Amino acid sequence: MYKNFFKILIVLFLLVVIKPLLADSSHVVNVYTFGEEIPNSVIVQFEKETGIKVNYSSFETNEIMYSKLRATGHPGYDVVEPSSYYVDRMRHQNMLEKLDKTRLPEYKNLDPVFLNVRYDPHSDYSVPFVWGITGIFTNTSYFPLGEVVRWSDLFNKKYFNQLMILDDPREAFSMALLMLGYPINDTNPVHIKQAYQKLRTLMPNIRLFNTDAVASILIDEDAAIGIAWNGDLARARVENTKLNFVYPREGFEIWVDNFSILKNAPHRDNAYKFINFLMRPDIAKKVSMEISYSTANLAARNLLPSEIKNDPVLYPSPEVLSHGQFEVDIGDTTYALLEKYWEQLKMEG
């Protein structure tokens, strides 16, 4: 009799306590993205509309994100946000779920320019979100329009100790490789050594390296010429109208931040709902307006104010964009070579 009573108590406990906990766990999505690329207001709206709680974490670089995922094996994340070349790397390493696009009805809103590109040839593993271009910035208070139009112009001795360079080896080596007539994804060690030697001649002109506070540096005029992302310049230009962005004639790098679903994601259904929500034109527009980066959502772009959607800094013409190259994975060996040369450069400087 007492045994039956205790069995009933256990069953009631499971029904009253454990079952709701399990139910709650199915109403969450674990998201890991670049910091500040998804405004908190957007997350709150998603939670309110769907009843799904977003456990949100952020990272500063692709390398940090990738290292954490590799180190933990199965970290419990559902949605991650790798840039183009890390989509390439992670899909080859079987880290990403092949997308079922029938579960993404808002996929139709995306700009075809960013679909089926080299880092994900059939767009099976990534959904493009925001994108940008690495180019040259100048401040017209110090340098007239048209004075700088090519990467090679930055090597002029009159810019001694004036340049700000992005503190990123791929960005710097992409510039040097383009000047030498090579693609930005070149893995030939001979070509990379030539790029290193080219960059050595630029060192006297470099004043500082930075990636974390680019907009602030441009606003405060701590540097008036150098290399920047177009989105940072657009954001800084709101406070400093003298800023100018140049698409170098030798070509330039196009970067794209994408959403992907991790292999064996614990909340796959909610991951699809979250990504689909972010592809809604009204939501993608809201994100783009708040973070000042270009949206890869064509329907959202069409909703933007005309002064933004027609801004050649954020949305260059198809002819200009045709001179850009998308980053792909260059492999551990090549990247290690870049890192070695990059450290040597900064030590020599």
Image: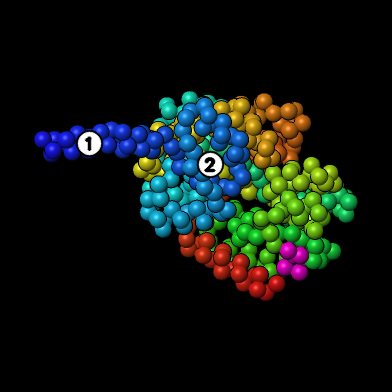
On the image, numbered disc 2 is attached to which residue?
258
- Give the secondary structure at mark 2: strand
**How many C-alpha atoms fall within 10 Å of the one at disc 2: few (<14), some, or many (≥20)?**
many
Q: In the rendered image, is residue 321 in sight?
A: no
- In depth, the one of 45 and 234 nearer the eye is 45
124 lies left or right of 37: left
In the figure, is residue 322 to the left or right of 83?
A: right
Q: Residue at x 52, y 59 (%)?
A: 187
The image shows residue 81 at horizontal and vertical percentages of 52, 44
Dot 1 corresponds to which residue?
9
x%, y% of residue 17? 32, 37
Q: Position of residue 318 (x, y in %)?
A: 67, 35
Residue situated in front as seen by the camera: 310 or 1: 1
Residue at the (89%, 51%) spot, across then down = 141
Residue interval drawn in magenta:
203-208
Amino acid tagged 2: Asn
Question: x, y percentage for residue 194?
Answer: 62, 66
Which mark sits nearer the N-terminus, 2 or 1?
A: 1
